[in-house]
């Protein structure tokens, strides 16, 4: 694939649904990342991952006041965020990305997962009077990225 085709795929993934087929296609594709192309390529992946995770977090935060008392709805939203984190992790492990960049992405994903967890807990403190929703968030282990 050309650089343009890769970026086009990244843009589709940025705001679209989790597309495992497209990701599978990217896993089998190659690109030469010579010179400053690597820097730009990594920057696009970074923007892609951050946009997807920010949109997921914004989505659950906008629904919190409506769903905090419904354990099933809250659990489904947490599962969705965990799926989004897993998808982001797959993106950052593309074979064309150098190992050192993959390691940096892993650290960044872990930090973001921790921030998501803290943000949800903090947001619930003023809303959840029973403490049940906060316990669901704490027990969900959003910030535990599995390999």
Image: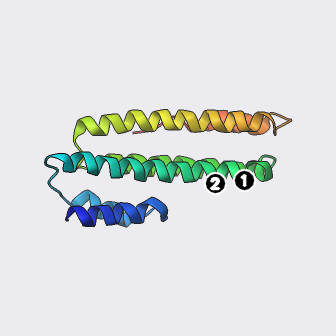
- Nearest the eye: 121 or 45: 45
For mark 2, give the secondary structure. helix
- Nearest the eye: 28 or 107: 107
The residues bearing labels 1 and 2 have C-alpha atoms spaced at a distance of: 7 Å
Residue picked out by circle 2? 59
**Crowd rating for badge 1 (residues with CA inside 10 Å; few <14, some 14–19, many 20+):** few
| Residue sitting at x 86%, y 35% | 129
Q: Which quarter of the figure has residue 117?
A: top right
* Image x and y of residue 122, in percent: 70, 33
Residue 63's disc number: 1
Residue 41's disc number: none
| Residue sitting at x 62%, y 47% | 78
| Residue sitting at x 73%, y 35% | 134
In the depicted structure, whether residue 131 falls above or below residue 85: above
Q: How many marks?
A: 2
Q: Are marks 1 and 2 in contact (CB under 8 Å)?
A: yes
* Image x and y of residue 139, in percent: 65, 34
For mark 1, give the secondary structure. helix
Identity of the residue furthest to the front in this view: 36
Instruction: Give the quarter of the figure containing the C terminus.
Output: top left
């Amino acid at each position: 694939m050309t650089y343009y085709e890769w970026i086009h795929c990244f843009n589709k993934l940025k705001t679209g649904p989790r597309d495992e087929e497209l990701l599978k296609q990217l896993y089998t594709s190659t690109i030469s990342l010579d010179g400053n192309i690597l820097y730009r390529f990594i920057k696009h992946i970074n923007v892609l991952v951050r946009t997807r995770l920010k949109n997921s977090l914004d989505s659950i935060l906008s629904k919190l006041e409506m769903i905090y008392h419904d354990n099933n709805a809250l659990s489904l939203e947490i599962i969705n965020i965990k799926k989004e984190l897993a998808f982001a992790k797959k993106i950052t492990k593309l074979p064309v990305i150098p190992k050192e960049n993959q390691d940096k992405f892993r650290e960044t994903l872990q930090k973001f997962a921790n921030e998501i967890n803290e943000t949800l807990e903090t947001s619930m403190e003023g809303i959840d009077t029973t403490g049940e929703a906060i316990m669901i968030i704490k027990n969900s282990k959003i910030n535990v990225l599995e390999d």
